[in-house]
Image (tube, coloured by chain):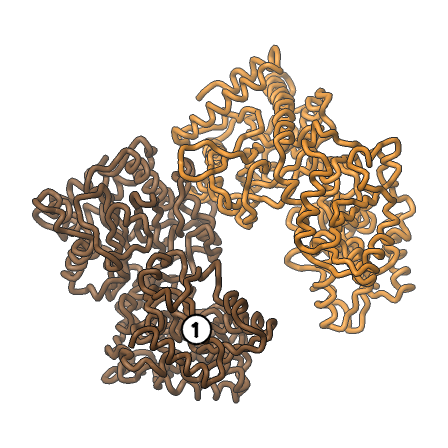
Chain colours: A brown, B orange
């Protein structure tokens, strides 16, 4: 069905239901970062398949709203005869609705696909202009999406304590204690990551994110009602794995469970930014008292236990060998005939193949960014959205990739010389790496948030009048999402204190538009440091084990301590990775880790 | 009158007015950092003369609330038979009132001495326990304080544009434009500093803070009604200085002016944290609409214009010579017989005498901290609160002092060897100075707040497991308060971006309880930096010009860049200060600024 017919079908349903507008967000009912193909409603209606955005359909026009990453892509993918384009942040769709609609209008939305917080804000805002937000029972897209993909049906995995390091019972009782302290009867969990962490389960419902999509209610006594596709747990002893107080029911029974809580007049805690409006509506209409608060599982999940940290170390050993093999192969390939037969796509495939050689490798932890020359200046570049660029034209190649292993999640960026870098490129690479090292060397007392450390990674660039327009570091899960909170190292970053077991990326960069892109990324885990001083302090232990490309360095821009750090890091990489390599790969590693 | 009689007198008034409690805060009606002697009500009732705190008087008991700085002092100054002692922050007096009073109680307070914000919060809190906050018309202390000092009557000073750099008319119209944009009819100004800045006036109403205490209304058209002791402006042409739309009236007429605004139904903006509850009550009862917002003069005042910056540079040239002479004298004195005849008091006096040699010197900008040995570990030590410690017993002397000059305000801390420092002291001094240098060398783009830079000054200490328990830097006024906002460099610091013309201190330290104290403080002004990079960045130009004591250094704890910075700084000090010195002082400066 062409998009014009899809729009017409949705408009017919709007007319039937007396709606003047219908909102189609990118999100699914879990409001997480990733969605499965069966939730790509925005793509179905508009053709836009980016990772964030929304469409709004009116009776006589429609618009797509995307952020700065997607302003080019949306023009390629959406028909301008059908859709206006607007900026998701600077021209929000509520503003557009207010400008387009007359008082008395009714705006349809699917309350499962919007947060409770959004609903409250939007309702107040529109009501001030006499416009009503109308929750629809059946999503108007779903009514017409006849070839909609089936949801994933991969079986769930019960993650053994050898990997998780802590029994679900211990995790649940710890959080349940905080509920009891706050006189909360139950916690509604709606995001996949905290539920999968809490129950030590994993799945394959979404590419790159190894989770079972599900909802859960955690009760004050530690009991959990899990709502998920029960077929995924056939032949699995979930209660034996988690404890008898963990029960499984189909997602269709969530509504009844919420209503039961409501009838009991329960105090139910939920995160208004991640719980959907539908669950909040069901609960409050049934008589529950809603208690808005941050999801209490986020912080314990972020602080990896020693088993998880050891697992991450082991995953990085394997991942370091795979990425090193790839870099050795790339150097070798460049010296052979016709390097232009390789492009960003074949390089990414080759890297994936090296990772797949590992039996413990499950899948990539995100879509590899494999970017040559000017493409690397686009932080969210993906070679599939155009013609992959071939080797041979550029001086620098940037590759940002990661893997999901049963014992940990990796994320690494290396910037590699694939031609002759200019002096300016070498200066900028050195400043970026220097910032990486300055942050890697940080120690800090309890209570220090990522916001306070961000400037360390930027200062070498700032000194010379440069900067980069993304955060310095994000949290990383344990065989879970490669992006997790609440910790973050960023100028707009979080004041949540960094503490033992948190894994964070350290990834300063530099991007010259239409020129080149540089990024140096390792993962690091927060650990107590050993000093003879007055107070305990933390330090960052580097997990990632792959050489940085010293051919891109201009050591005039380093101080002695940076050279020392780099030599020590390369010595460690050699010691840990060389036992896994042989032949040409081993020879490559030896020269790549040679001291400066 | 002894304190017991004073308490009785106040309790009699409480009975007459049907009050079960009366609150005596340290603040005066301007709610600023400093108060004049005639406002020392807390001292009158309790004997406690610290710079912050409160007393609460009940029918049968009373309590004094002070913060961590004053827990020792309060025990020296207040009679425990009359007053309990509590911690102002961890045991707030509202909690104490709630524990002590029965429902139905009436708590008297002087609404001129509490902020509008406090009043709203306290009222709600007490009302929940059926306790009423009762604003008194006449302060119960004032009714009985018969030997109360007269308010200062020094004449005001009209600060010429040669010093201020901008006519009051320009300042007023700039802020008035923001009022117009926000559809605000008038801004109530209640703090001395913004009013004195706005009208380019100064005074001598408070020691160390060169202001005329006053209130003002800034109207949307830029006109100002100033309410102050009119005798201070006799023989002065205020309207000629400021513009004909600046009118002067006695403070007693403020009430009528507020009521007039109320009758007009005006929208009046005020800062709820600095405007007193009395003015808010008068305005709202008269019919005005209160608009709570940050004081819009704070940011323009903080960003010094080029004339003010030049003035500050000139003030620091003079101040640097005075402090250098003092340090030269101190070194000389230590080599002469009987150094123990000098103590913290005589040293502070000597330093003051050197500053007073300057005809442009007006007064100290705060009470000098002159602290030997263990006394320097108390950040708010003052030698007058006990027996000043004599020279000769300690290795280290810390002196934190500053001056008010017509063209600028100074604030400098030097830590000096006055005995034989241990290796540990030298290590710690070096780490502190290294942190000072790392912050001094910072460059940063627009939008960077002090919170993001604070860690630079702490990192050398953090690396070794040390820290200091105060902010790294505060704003400094131009011939105004030595402490000003909104910028601040601190772990709990402000995200207000640092920008051109802001003056900030850079003062990391280290304090070993019962041992010694170290602090290295210069003032710096934010200026655009010159780089060949992509984006404009700021840097910190150091204003203070006095050598650091290199005898306390252990250069093993420095990197090359710190030695370079220090040598360059000392070269600058030599070049700028040496022309003002002669004889022994000049010889001292030469060796004190010798390159490492």
Residue beneath the point at 28% across and 49% down: A376
Q: Quadrant of residue B231?
A: top right
Query: Horizontally, is B569 left or right of A400 in the view?
Result: right
Q: Quadrant of residue A64?
A: bottom left
Percent position (x, y) of residue A19?
48, 80
> Image height check: is A199 above or below B549?
below
Q: Residue furthest top?
A: B583
Q: Is residue A276 visible?
A: no
Percent position (x, y) of residue A362?
21, 66
Percent position (x, y) of residue A447?
48, 54
The residue at which mark 1 appears reads as: A57
Closer to us: A315 or A466: A466
Query: Horizontally, is B331 left or right of A88 in the view?
Result: right
Q: Quadrant of the N terminus of chain A?
A: bottom left
Q: Quadrant of the C terminus of chain A?
A: top left
Percent position (x, y) of residue B277?
77, 57
> Image height check: is A373 above or below A249?
above
Label 1: how many Cα within 10 Å (few below 14, some 14–19, many 20+): many
Residue beneath the point at 44% across and 48% down: A453
Closer to us: B241 or A537: B241
Q: How many marks?
A: 1
Q: Quadrant of residue B130?
A: bottom right
Q: Is residue B9 visible?
A: yes
> Image height check: is B120 above or below B591?
below
Helix, strand or loop at mark 1: strand
Residue beneath the point at 59% across and 38% down: B502
Closer to us: B358 or B215: B215
Closer to us: A102 or A116: A102
Which chain letter goes with mark 1? A
> Image height check: is A161 above or below A411?
below
């Amino acid at each position: 069905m062409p998009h014009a017919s899809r729009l017409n079908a949705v408009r017919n349903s709007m007319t039937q239901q007396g709606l003047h507008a219908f909102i189609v967000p990118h999100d699914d009912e879990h409001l997480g970062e990733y969605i499965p193909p069966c939730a790509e409603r925005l793509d179905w209606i508009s053709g836009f398949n980016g990772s964030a955005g929304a469409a709004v359909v009116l009776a006589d026009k429609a618009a797509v709203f995307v952020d700065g990453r997607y302003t080019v892509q949306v023009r390629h993918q959406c028909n301008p005869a059908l859709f206006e384009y607007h900026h998701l942040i600077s021209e929000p769709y509520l503003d557009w609705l207010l400008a387009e609609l007359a008082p008395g209008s009714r705006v349809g939305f699917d309350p499962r696909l919007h947060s409770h917080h959004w609903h409250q804000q939007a309702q107040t805002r529109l009501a001030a202009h006499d416009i009503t937000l109308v929750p629809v029972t059946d999503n108007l897209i779903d009514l017409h999406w006849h070839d909609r993909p089936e949801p994933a049906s991969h079986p769930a995995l019960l993650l053994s304590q050898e990997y998780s390091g802590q029994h679900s019972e211990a995790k649940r009782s710890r959080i349940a204690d905080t509920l009891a302290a706050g006189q909360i009867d139950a916690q509604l969990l709606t995001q996949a990551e905290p539920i999968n962490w809490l129950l030590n389960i994993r799945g394959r419902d979404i590419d790159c994110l190894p989770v079972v999509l599900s909802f859960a209610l955690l009760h004050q006594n530690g009991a959990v009602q899990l709502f998920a596709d029960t077929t995924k747990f056939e032949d699995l002893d979930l209660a034996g794995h988690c404890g008898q107080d963990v029960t499984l029911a189909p997602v269709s029974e969530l509504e009844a469970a919420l209503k039961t809580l409501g009838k009991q007049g329960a105090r139910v805690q939920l995160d208004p930014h991640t719980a959907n409006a539908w669950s909040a509506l069901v609960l409050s209409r049934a008589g529950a008292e809603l208690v808005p608060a941050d999801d209490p599982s986020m912080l314990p999940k972020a602080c990896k236990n020693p088993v998880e940290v050891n697992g991450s170390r082991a995953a990085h050993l394997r991942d370091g060998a795979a990425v090193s093999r790839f870099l050795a192969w790339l150097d070798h390939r460049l010296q052979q005939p016709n390097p232009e037969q390789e492009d960003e796509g074949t390089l990414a495939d080759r890297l994936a193949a090296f990772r797949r050689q590992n039996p413990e490798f499950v899948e990539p932890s995100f879509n590899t960014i494999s970017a040559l020359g000017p493409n690397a200046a686009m932080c969210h570049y993906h070679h599939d959205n155009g013609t992959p660029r071939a080797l041979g034209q550029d001086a620098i190649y940037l590759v940002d990739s990661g893997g999901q292993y049963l014992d940990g999640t990796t994320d690494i960026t290396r910037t590699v010389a694939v031609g002759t870098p200019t002096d300016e490129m070498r200066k900028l690479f050195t400043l970026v790496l220097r910032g990486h090292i300055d942050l890697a060397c940080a120690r800090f007392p309890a209570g220090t948030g990522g916001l306070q450390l961000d400037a360390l990674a930027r200062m070498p660039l700032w000194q010379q009048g440069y900067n980069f327009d993304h955060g310095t570091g994000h949290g990383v899960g344990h065989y879970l999402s490669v992006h997790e909170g609440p910790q973050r190292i960023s100028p707009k970053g979080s004041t949540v204190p960094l503490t033992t077991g948190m894994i964070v990326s350290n990834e300063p960069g530099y991007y010259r538009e239409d020129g080149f892109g540089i990024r140096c990324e390792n993962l690091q885990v927060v650990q107590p440091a050993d000093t003879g001083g007055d107070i305990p302090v933390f330090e960052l232990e580097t997990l990632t084990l792959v050489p940085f490309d010293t051919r891109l360095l201009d050591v005039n821009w380093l101080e002695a301590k940076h050279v020392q750090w780099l030599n020590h890091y390369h010595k460690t990489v050699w010691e840990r990775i060389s036992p896994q390599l042989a032949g040409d790969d081993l020879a490559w590693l030896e020269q790549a880790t040679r001291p400066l």
